Amino acid sequence: MLSLHKLSISYPNQLWLKITKEIQQKSWQRSQSYSNPTSRCQAYLNDVCWQTFIPWLQAWLEEDGSDSGLITHQYSPNIWEFVNGSVINLEQTKIALIPSETSDLEEFDIPQEGVDIPQWQADYYLAIQVNFDVSEEAWIRVRGYVSYQQLKHKGEYEESDRSYYISQEYLEEDITAILLSPQAVAQKKQELVTSTELSSVIANQLLDKLGNPVVYYPRLAIPFSQWTILITNPEWRQKLFEQRTGLAKVSLFNSQAINLQQWLQELTHVVEESWQTVENLLTPLEPISVRGYRYTEETITKEAITPLIQLLKPHNPEKERTQAAGILGKIGAGYPEAISALTELLHTAKEEETRWQAALSLGEIDPGNADAGRAKGKLIDLGIQLENQKIALIVAIMAQTQDRVGVWIQLKPAHESIKLPPHLKLSILSDEKTILEAETRSDPEGKGKDGLLQLRFTPPSGTHFQVEVSLNEANFTEYFDA
């Protein structure tokens, strides 16, 4: 991959700016209050772009001998819940920053709000590519700009997403041209809005409708004339923002959370199709074995089961008892002796990991058993590959008391021979507070050292919690009800 320095040499007329780790972290934290993944991503991109570009612009103007105090900001983060972009006022000229993560540079798209709402019109629109590739430096690239007049003349309007599109060939690359001699070019009096008023009754009805996060794209849900009036009113816009982000927490847990009590009762319809058995998800290093003896389908007999049951006895090392319990979960179906031995182990073992393995093995060979545990997993995408293998999130549960379940969260590579990357975090949050967290380590060469990351806890019945996996800026979250 080319470094930022080499990229700036290859494209000398375009502006390339490094995004600092501090900006990434703070922008990411701020973006988490938005109502859905699309809005959070949009807010993150815009915040990172703003925090990186504005200091550069101020420094550039001062170096050029211009007054950086001429910059006035139209910085309203609540807009990013709905619309991509932000505007800078430079003397009498407005410059819009329109960020995107796309690698498709054939077109530049601008939301209609930034073009056809008079208050939000800009004279120039900057196409900004944002890069967060973990294998490279994070940067923003101003790949060019287009004037309002050129956009209206050469661009195409797409009704389906209320956006203007213009080909990359019409973009000018060197933004210093508009910074050295800024001038207004937009047709300020052009208005597409036929009404300048919206009654409070209708406004409140629209706020109630659009304030529910289930309406994923509120800007497309009502006529543009009504949307324009609603979104440009600061009080209504803030109220809409608060309604959507306030309802988001309730909505997420009501509509997306997995109910672990139902999962424990084998009500499989509550689990998404993307959740699989652990055996289907992971590729083991070798056939299961204990004390050097390998067990395969061909070797499963009652004579093979008996020595494994003997290994569950208290006088054996705890590690061997756990391994034997795990093997019984693979081969013990149909053998009542195995079920009885695992049940006894679950109630007598002193080590928590041994009890967990006994419960999960019971779940494999006797799903209807009251003591049976459950384990499911899914592959997650953090934008990285580990030697062509993804990371698996595994969630195991077992009954602890009459109304509480134990929860065991694990992160593993899809193949056991691979190590997890360093600084991978596994967090459990409740009421927006981190209650448990673990992080992978690195070896002396800076490579991953751990093949497993895990957390265990017993939440009170009715607890809402979320499991978060993060690496640098990448983030994955699942929601659960205990």
Image (tube, rainbow, N blue to C red):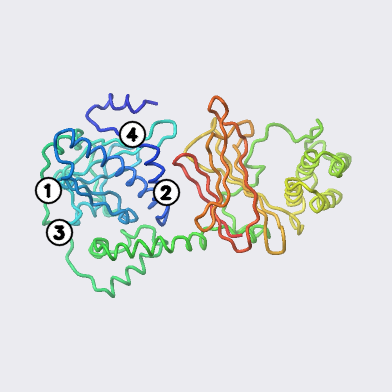
Question: Sequence-wise, which precedes: disc 3 or disc 2?
Answer: 2
Q: CA distance from mark 3 to mark 2?
A: 37 Å
Q: Which mark is residue 191?
A: 3
Q: Amino acid at mark 4?
A: Lys
Q: CA distance from mark 4 to mark 3?
A: 38 Å
Question: Sequence-wise, which precedes: disc 1 or disc 4?
Answer: 4
Which quadrant of the structure image shows residue 240? bottom left
Q: Residue at x 52, y 63 (%)?
A: 254
Quarter containing the N terminus: top left
Is 131 above or below relative to 77?
above
Front: mark 1 or 3:
1
**Residue 149, image x and y in percent?**
13, 46
Dot 1 surroundings within 10 Å: few (below 14), some, or many (20 or more)? few
Q: Amino acid at mark 2?
A: Gln
Relative side of 384 to 22, left or right: right
Dot 4 surroundings within 10 Å: few (below 14), some, or many (20 or more)? some
Q: Which residue is disc 1 drawn over?
A: 92
Which quadrant of the structure image shows residue 55? top left
- Tell me the SS state at disc 3: loop
Quarter containing the C terminus: bottom right
- Tell me the SS state at disc 1: loop
Q: Amino acid at mark 1?
A: Gln
Is 83 above or below relative to 193?
above
Question: Sequence-wise, which precedes: disc 1 or disc 2?
Answer: 2
Q: CA distance from mark 1 to mark 2?
A: 33 Å
Front: mark 3 or 2:
2
Q: Which mark is residue 18?
A: 4
Q: Which residue is disc 2 drawn over?
A: 29
